[in-house]
Image (cartoon, rainbow, N blue to C red):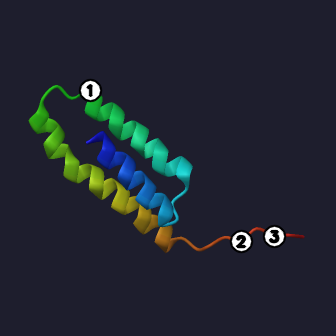
Amino acid sequence: MIGSIVFLARAAIQAGVSADRAFSLSNALTQQIEDMRFQNAVLAYEENILLQYVELVRQRLRSPIRFLSCA
């Protein structure tokens, strides 16, 4: 499951999400999983993890692209 979270974080970064946001979510999700006591709870949480990364990418795609000024 932790490997899946890292994979989702990297995919989100490739889609334009900042590395800071993607890995912050990764850390938070990993901590939540580590606090769970039962395997079935972790498996039930898996869909929620995916949806959180989908939401990050969706927000990124809806936000305007900002260009740095060279002036």
Q: Which residue in the structure is indicated by mark 2?
A: 67
* Residue that sits furthest to the left in the current view: 40
**Whether residue 52 is situated above or below residue 31 in the rendered picture:** below
**Could you tell me how far apart the alpha carbons at marks 3 and 2 are, in whole angstroms?**
6 Å
Q: CA distance from mark 1 to mark 3?
A: 44 Å
Q: Left or right of 43: which side holds 3? A: right
Left/right of residue 54 with respect to residue 61 in the rendered view: left
Rendered location of residue 42, percent (x, y): 18, 38
Q: Amino acid at mark 3?
A: Ser
Local SS, label 3: loop
Residue positioned 34% across, 40% down in the render: 29
Asked whether, in this view, residue 21 is left or right of residue 53, the answer is right
Mark count: 3
| Residue, disc 3 | 69
Q: Quadrant of the N terminus?
A: top left
From the image, tell me which residue sits under label 1.
Answer: 35
Q: Residue at x 9, y 37 (%)?
A: 40
Residue type, numbered disc 2: Phe
Nearer to me, 7 or 31: 7
Quadrant for residue 52, please give it. bottom left
Q: Residue shown at 49%/63% (left/top)?
A: 14
Q: CA distance from mark 1 to mark 2?
A: 40 Å
The answer to whether the residues at label 3 and label 2 have Cβ atoms under 8 Å apart is yes
Expressed as whole percent of the image width and height from the top left, the position of residue 9 reads 42, 52
* Classed neighbour count for the residue bearing mark 1: other residues with Cα under 10 Å, few (<14), some (14–19), many (≥20): few
Give the residue displayed 51% in from the left and 50% down from the top: 21
Q: Quadrant of the C terminus?
A: bottom right
Name above or below for residue 58 compared with residue 53.
below
Residue 46 lies, in percent from the top left, at 21, 48
